Image (tube, grey):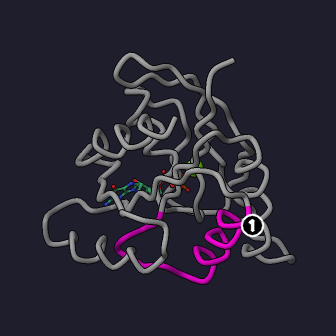
Amino acid sequence: ELPVVAIVGRPNVGKSTLVNRILRRREAVVEDVPGVTRDRVAYEGEWSGRRFTMIDTGGWEATATGIHLKVAEQAEVAIDMADVVLFVVDATVGATDDDEAVVRLLRRAGKPVVLVANKVDDMRMEGEAAALWNLGLGQPWPVSALHGRGSGDALDAVLEVL
Ligand code: GDP
Ligand code: MG
C-alpha cells in the first residue's frame, strides 16, 4: 500500500496542473473553466525515489446546492483517505471563504498539511504567497504549477511528513 497524498482546494486553483507537474505527464485534465465534473482520480506519483498515490479531487459542479458545499464534500472524502494533504490555494486570489472552509476541515482531521501557494509565476507574487501564513497552516510554499517554479521544494516538504 502506497502512502496517499490528497490534492485539495477550490476549483481552478491549479490542482490538476500540479498533479501533471508531479507526474511529468499531462494525465490530469486541466480546465480553464471551473465546473466540469471529474471526481477523485488516483495517480501513482514518485519524487526523490519515493512512490505515493496522488488523489486529484477533480472539478466541482456548481449546482443548486452551491459550489461552496461541493468543495467541502470533496475535500472531506479526500482528506479522509490522505496520509498527507497538499492544500492548494491560488495566491493571485488570496484566501477565500471556500479556502477557509477547507482549513476548518483540515484542522478537524488533524492530518499533516503542506500548503501550496500556487500561481506564483514570478518573484512579484511572492508577497501574495507569504500572506497565506494567515491561514495558520504553517509555511505557504510558493509554486507555479504551470512553469514548475517551487514545486520541488513543496514536494520535498510532502516527503518530510510522509
Ligand atoms: P483545478 O481546477 O484546481 O484542477 O485547476 P486546473 O489545474 O484545471 O487549472 C485551472 C487554470 O489555472 C488553468 O487555466 C491552468 O492553466 C491555470 N493554472 C494552473 N496552475 C497555474 C500556475 O501556476 N500559474 C498560472 N498562471 N496559471 C495556472
Ligand atoms: Mg482539476
Residue nearest the viewer, comparing 82 with 99: 82
> Which stretch did the figure color magenta?
89-108
Side of 67 relative to 32 (left or right): right
Residue nearest the viewer, comparing 155 with 93: 155
Q: Position of residue 27 (x, y in %)?
A: 52, 30
Q: Position of residue 139 (x, y in %)?
A: 36, 63
* Disc 1 crowd, CA 10 A, few/some/many (<14, 14-19, 20+): many
Q: Position of residue 88 (x, y in %)?
A: 49, 58
Side of 93 relative to 71 (left or right): left
- Magenta segment's dominant SS is helix
Which residue corresponds to mark 1?
A: 72
Q: Residue at x 63, y 76 (%)?
A: 98
Q: Is residue 35 positioned above or below 64 on the image?
A: above
Quadrant position of the N terminus in the picture:
top right
Query: Does 95 appear in magenta?
Result: yes
Location of residue 125 by image quarter: bottom left
Side of 8 relative to 157 (left or right): right
Residue nearest the viewer, comparing 98 with 34: 98
In this figure, what is the number of numbered marks? 1
Query: Does 122 appear in magenta?
Result: no
Q: Residue at x 34, y 22 (%)?
A: 48
Q: Position of residue 101 (x, y in %)?
A: 67, 75
Q: Amino acid at mark 1?
A: Ala
Q: Is residue 34 positioned above or below 147 on the image?
A: below
Residue furthest to the right? 65
Instruction: Name the quadrant where ligand 1 sits.
Output: bottom left
CB at disc 1 and ligand 1 closer than 8 Å: no
Side of 59 relative to 5 (left or right): right
- Secondary structure beneath dot 1 equals helix
